Image: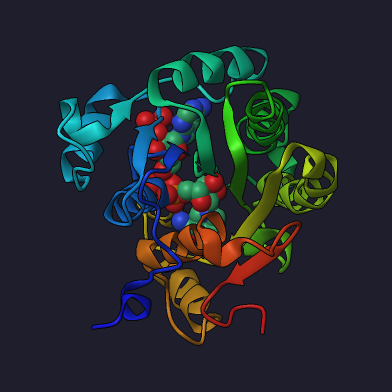
């Protein structure tokens, strides 16, 4: 076999990656995939027990403790503390080549019960955290010479999603922030992209479905020509944008939605 046959442009061997929301769903699948591609992964979420479960699923990349990976519990709603926390993590894990920001929250709530507290929480955890992570990553010692960030938006931002307006606004904000940050962080050698998934079966969606009738769920399924997605469908897109396959891509919102918005 010639060496060219062995070249894998998605290889992450020798790279250090931070994955937020790694204790469940899309973040967990992303962390597992990045480790399979050879990356050392720092796992963030708030629930240490569930992060330990993710850690046990990762492919070891070194003989060090925990196969070269680490857990790093922290609340992504603590915006002002995120940059300093990232500095501590980079000192322990090595400068980050990539950040997959998968932490997010969604609670279905019609506009008639809108409150300021609800707005602040949804905006802070979903959108504010992207901005604080971007601020943190560009610090000296936190990023490798070249780095990439991937955020998760949602088709809730690009196709009507009733009773989900604040979440949709936060996810729309992520698309706007991705564009602005891609230009602002270009001189720092940081690419910034987001993925825009439709419905993928995770705890987040199962909690939302508890509030819907079977008829409503069937309607949502019919809206997606390729059916509901799997966490790996989104993880693959994130890995593509983080790896050298995404080398020439920045400021993009990559739709991964089973045809929902086609
Ligand atoms: N599933 C879908 O259909 C879908 C579609 C479009 C977009 N998305 C987006 O994709 C991302 C992942 O969603 P998912 O479906 O995988 O959700 P999930 O299964 O509910 O997992 C959410 C993850 O976010 C973490 N998290 C939540 N709040 C946090 C906080 N304040 N600080 C740190 N971590 C926090 C959770 O960890 P802890 O509980 O341990 O903190 C968990 O690991 C979210 O941004 C979501 O909006 C999902």
Q: Would you say 174 lies left or right of 88 here?
A: right
The foreground one among 94 and 112 is: 94
Q: Is residue 124 above or below residue 163?
A: above
Please report the residue visible at 19 percent of the width from the left and 35 percent of the height from the top: 67
Residue 50 visible in image: no
Please report the residue visible at 44 percent of the width from the left and 77 percent of the height from the top: 218
The foreground one among 229 and 203 is: 229
Q: Would you say 34 lies left or right of 211 here?
A: left
What coloring was used for the rendering? rainbow
Q: Is residue 128 above or below residue 79?
A: below
- Residue found farthest to the front: 2
Q: Quadrant of residue 252?
A: bottom right
Identify the image quadrant of the C terminus. bottom right
Q: Is residue 114 above or below residue 49?
A: below
Residue 218 visible in image: yes
Q: Position of residue 90 (x, y in %)?
A: 48, 22
Q: Position of residue 81 (x, y in %)?
A: 61, 12
């Amino acid at each position: 076999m010639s060496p060219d046959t062995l070249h894998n442009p998605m290889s992450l061997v020798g790279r250090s990656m931070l994955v937020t929301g790694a204790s469940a769903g899309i973040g967990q699948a992303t962390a597992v995939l990045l480790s399979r591609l050879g990356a050392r992964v720092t796992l963030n979420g708030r629930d240490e027990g569930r992060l330990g479960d993710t850690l046990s699923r990762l492919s070891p990349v070194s003989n060090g403790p925990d196969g070269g990976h680490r857990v790093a519990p922290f609340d992504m709603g603590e915006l002002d503390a995120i940059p300093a926390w990232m500095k501590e993590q980079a000192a322990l894990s090595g400068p980050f080549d990539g950040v997959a920001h998968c932490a997010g929250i969604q609670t279905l709530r019609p506009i008639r019960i809108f409150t300021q507290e609800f707005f602040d929480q949804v905006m802070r955890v979903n959108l504010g955290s992207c901005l604080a992570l971007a601020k943190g990553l560009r610090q000296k010692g936190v990023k490798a010479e070249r780095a990439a960030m991937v955020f998760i938006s949602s088709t809730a931002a690009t196709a009507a999603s009733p009773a989900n307006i604040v979440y949709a606004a936060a996810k729309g904000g992520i698309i706007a922030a991705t564009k602005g940050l891609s230009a602002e962080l270009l001189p720092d050698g940081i690419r910034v992209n987001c993925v825009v998934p439709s419905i993928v079966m995770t705890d987040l969606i199962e909690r939302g479905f508890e509030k819907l009738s079977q008829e409503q769920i069937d309607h949502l399924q019919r809206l997606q020509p390729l059916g509901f997605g799997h966490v790996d469908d989104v993880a693959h897109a994130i890995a593509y944008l983080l790896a050298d396959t995404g080398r020439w891509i920045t400021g993009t919102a990559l739709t991964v939605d089973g045809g929902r918005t086609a």
